[in-house]
Amino acid sequence: MRRGSKKNQEESQHRIDVTAADCADQRLIRFLAKDGSTYYGDAILPSGVTDIAKATQTRVITGHIFGKHHVTDQVAEVRLLLAPLVREDVKTVRCLGLNYERHAKESKMPLPQYPVLFYKPVTALAGPFDEIPVPAPAQEVKGLDYECELVAVIGKEARNVPEAEALNHVLGYAVGNDVSHREWQLKRGGGQWALGKGFDGWAPFGPGIVASRLIKDPQALMISTKLNGKTVQDSSTDDMIFGVASVISFLSQGTTLLPGDIIFTGTPQGVGSGRSPPLWLKNGDVVEVSLEGVGSCMNKIAYANSKPRL
């Protein structure tokens, strides 16, 4: 067998070769560097810090995130964190409704016997600090709401997987906001939720993707939302009706989950529509969703100026 050159041997000592199915211990980010270029990276965090949003430096990753890629020794300065995955790498955006017991109760709805599934278009995805654009049709009537959610990213193809093996197919976890307009979701959507949840930019997530091996139990994480600095949702993922492993196993029955599939796993109690009087989002509000061990996304509500064309 031919040996590699001395140069190649030296280079191999300064990088980690990984695949999405066998991810290195990393906090995957996609970012705009101070040199003006966009990269993937393995976030470098100070000791004791787990919020990826606080990353200012990262080791650059080369290659394809869902194929073979390399964590290099090149350190870059982070100017802005972007959505953790480029749109072209996302296959589907699946979402669950009524997946927290106390949220189902505040919604005055019975606990579902099976996961309640709906989809968002990939154009709904946005970065952890992007503005949330509210188009004219969604400004006609009140009803704009927030939903903090644990987001699971599939890293390895899954079909008919048993629950005991489901988490082996997870690349990692992020936090997201399933932005919703209750009027369009429940009344104007013809009985389907997707229209009231699928406007452009209505699924910000990030601030990165924490490798699944770093989060041993996705059912033991604190999850919360702050609205203009005030806590409005404060719960734990142990209140999920269907845990992450159960959800992945269920969704994979007869349907193949692909690397790059994103699953928003539902929101806990405290949404605006569950309050009396309702607490609706308005122009200029700042929504911060957080997940223990992952970090926070902070997004500002921004009304569009265009008039509706209905």
Image (tube, rainbow, N blue to C red):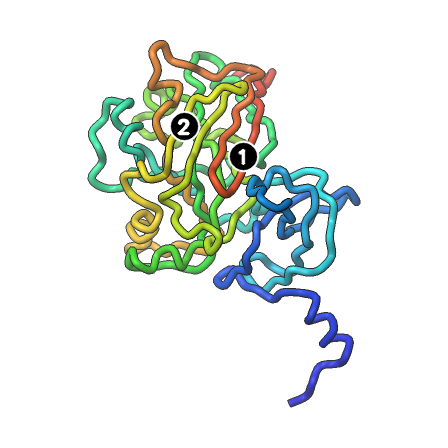
In the image, residue 95 sits, relative to residue 28, either above or below, namely: above
> Residue beneath label 1, please?
296
Q: Is residue 207 left or right of residue 213?
A: right
In percent of width and height, residue 61 lies at: 65, 56
Residue 5 visible in the picture: yes
Cα–Cα span, label 2 and label 1: 14 Å
Quick one: SS at disc 1? strand
Quick one: SS at disc 2? strand
Asked which quadrant contains residue 46, the reply is top right
Asked which quadrant contains residue 116, the reply is top left
> Residue beneath label 2, please?
234
In the image, residue 43 sits, relative to residue 97, either above or below, namely: below
Which circle, 2 or 1, is nearer the viewer? 2
Q: Quadrant of the N terminus?
A: bottom right
Q: Which residue does the image show at 28% across and 22% down from the upper left? A: 106
Which disc number belongs to residue 227?
none
Q: Which residue does the image show at 74% across and 49% down from the upper left? A: 76
Which amino acid, mark 1?
A: Ser
Which amino acid, mark 2?
A: Asp
Q: Is residue 187 left or right of residue 41?
A: left
Q: Is residue 160 left or right of residue 39?
A: left
Badge 2 crowding class, 10 Å Cα cut-off, few under 14, some 14 to 19, many 20 or more, is some
Determine whether label 2 and label 1 are within 8 Å by CB: no
In percent of width and height, residue 103 lies at: 31, 28
Give whichever of 20, 295 is nearer the camera: 295
Q: Which residue does the image show at 57% across and 47% down from the upper left? A: 85
